[in-house]
Amino acid sequence: MKQATILAILAFLLAAVWAAAQTAEPPFSKQYLPVKQYSQAENEAMVAKFKDLRVTDVVDGLDVVGLQDVTVMDAGIKQLWRDEKNFTHRIYGVAVTLRLMPPQERAPIFPTHEEFAKWESAWYKTRNPNDFTRQLQPDTILVIDASRTRDVGFCGSNNALGWFTRGMRGIVIDGGCRDSDEVILERIPVYQRGSTRGIDPGRILTESYNLPVNVGGVLVMPGDMIVADTEGVVVVPRAKAEAVAAAARRIQDGDKAGRRKLYDKLKMAPDFTVK
């Protein structure tokens, strides 16, 4: 068969496929932003590159790769508590994303507490899936889009502590947690808009996990790097993470060397921030 004939046949087939695609019914729903799954070993190796970096170092590193102010969450999301001695409120890890939505119903009115407790128990079993917790491996940070919800504390002193036992490093939520006094005492790092009070049933629905979310005005993809301290929260897209970490590390090392000289000049005892 001549080459020209073969090309003509291929062109005809491609045209037919294209025409069929134009007339086919689109799917009822579709996820446009693709997500990528990384192994635990890949995540831990990446987190190690960000160990002890400050938000300011990471923001400077993002400047180096051309992402000035693109992935810095707004200042309304801030730490619940602060450790001024050891900086244990600082967190860095891999994002596990969760999206919450307001419901289209409220809790019925119950004549007794016992009947309410029975309804509440059934609600947690059927309306509040918690399979996302299996994603909370060591070096992860739970990033929650709860911006569309009202005064509801999806995370509190009990469930947050349970997630912490899995190796989760902290919580970043565009919304808030409840039981703040206990969460502070338990030293669970939380970055939020403000404390909340209500329980979940009748106030919230879990919509999805490990899909793209908008938290603090920033796109967060599952697997992105999260760094948070007193300066706020910054997101590092995974594709840029290695380059950002390398640049941020050079910037931090230079800052440490410069401040160490000033410590010596002022006869200040060196602390861990300059070592």
Image (cartoon, grey):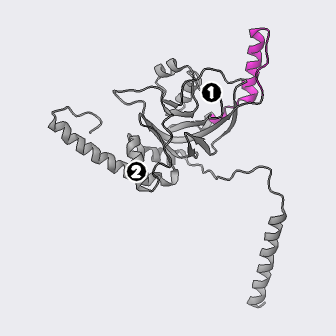
Distance Cα–Cα, label 1 vs label 2 = 33 Å
What is the x, y in percent for residue 260?
Answer: 22, 40
**Residue 170 located left or right of residue 30:** left
- What residue is shown at x 42% (from left), y 44% (from top)? 50
**Residue type pointed to by label 1:** Phe
The stretch in magenta equals 105-132
For the N terminus, the quadrant is bottom right
Majority secondary structure of magenta residues: helix
Q: Are marks 1 and 2 in contact (CB under 8 Å)?
A: no
What residue did someone put label 1 on? 154
**Residue type pointed to by label 2:** Gly
- What residue is shown at x 67% (from left), y 31% (from top)? 130
Image position of 112 with respect to 167: above or below: above
Q: Please, which residue is most extreme toward the top here? A: 112
**Residue 223 located left or right of residue 47:** right
What is the x, y in percent for residue 121?
Answer: 73, 20
